[in-house]
Amino acid sequence: MSSGPPVRVRTGGEYGVASSSLTRSDQRVVNGSWTSGQSLAFLAAVDEPKAAPGRGPMGGRYEAAIATFVAVLALAVSAYTAYIQRQQVRAQVWPILEYGSGNEPALRLWLANKGVGPALIRHVVVTVDGNPAADWNAAMRSLFGARVNRPGRYSYSQETIGDRVLSAGENLAIFIPHFDATQEELRTAFDKDRFRIGVEICYCSTLGDCWTLVAAGRQPARTNERGRCPAPSAATFKQ
């Protein structure tokens, strides 16, 4: 047989050189089977280590981009889940204050919490014709002027408004005037002029979300969300 070019044969992890000029005596046992030197050369070629597909520079960048995208997506999902959970908790403790007045069974001004959570009242302003009143005495004088000094018995009952907690569903009579029989004129006047009294009440939920209720006269009341309640000032209602 003619001899051919040398071939590399792997033995014990190293490659040696073997001639392709083979005879029967060149047969070897590989994995328990008899094979020729040419087959050994073929197996050696198959056994050559090869680079894994997709492991080049472009493949590495692609895998890094995918990993970054997955991490960002997971962070976004986590943030959105936390936002939804907070909104759900916020809805469960949301207070809604409402101000009004009535004349049955008695003349009164009232404040109610129509929400589902407690209202933490932080700041109160009471107005008459849009002007702040220092207290209920000042408010009554703004309404009636010197008429409150006429002979007769005049008094009122009040509930503290500022720095208190109004529970969900609670209705509070914040001001109840009392007139005796000689002051029926004042009673009739208050029943007519009670709509001149308004309030600006800042309150918060147990989560720290705050709102301001603005209710004045016969105008529709409005509630504005705000970051925090104002500090006490000259306009703050005193009790």
Image (spheres, rainbow, N blue to C red):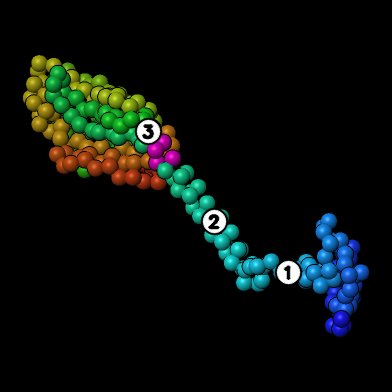
Using the rendered image of the protein, determine whether residue 111 is visible from the camera's viewpoint: yes
Q: The N terminus lies in which quarter of the figure? A: bottom right
**The magenta stretch spans residue 46:** no
Q: Nearer the viewer, mark 2 or mark 1?
A: 1
The amino acid pointed to by label 2 is Val
Q: Nearer the viewer, mark 3 or mark 2?
A: 2
Q: How many marks?
A: 3
Name the residue rendered at 51%, 55% in the picture: 73
Q: Residue 186: x, y in percent?
A: 11, 25
Instruction: Name the residue carrying label 1.
Output: 50
Return the mark for residue 92. Answer: 3
User: Residue 70's mark?
Assistant: 2
Query: Which mark, by number, is residue 231?
Result: none
Q: CA distance from mark 3 to mark 1?
A: 63 Å
Say which amino acid is labelled 3: Gln
Residue beneath the point at 23% across and 33% down: 99
Q: Nearer the viewer, mark 3 or mark 1?
A: 1
The answer to whether 216 is drawn above or below residue 103 in the figure is below
Please, what secondary structure does the residue beneath circle 1 have?
loop
Secondary element type, mark 3: helix
**Mark 2 surroundings within 10 Å by alpha-carbon count, few (fewer than 14), some (14 through 19), many (20 or more):** few
**Quarter of the image where the C terminus is located:** top left
What's the magenta region?
85-89
Could you tell me residue 183's position as x and y percent? 10, 21
User: Looking at the image, which residue sits at the far right?
Assistant: 25
Q: Are marks 3 and 2 in contact (CB under 8 Å)?
A: no
The image position of residue 211, as x and y in percent, is 34, 41
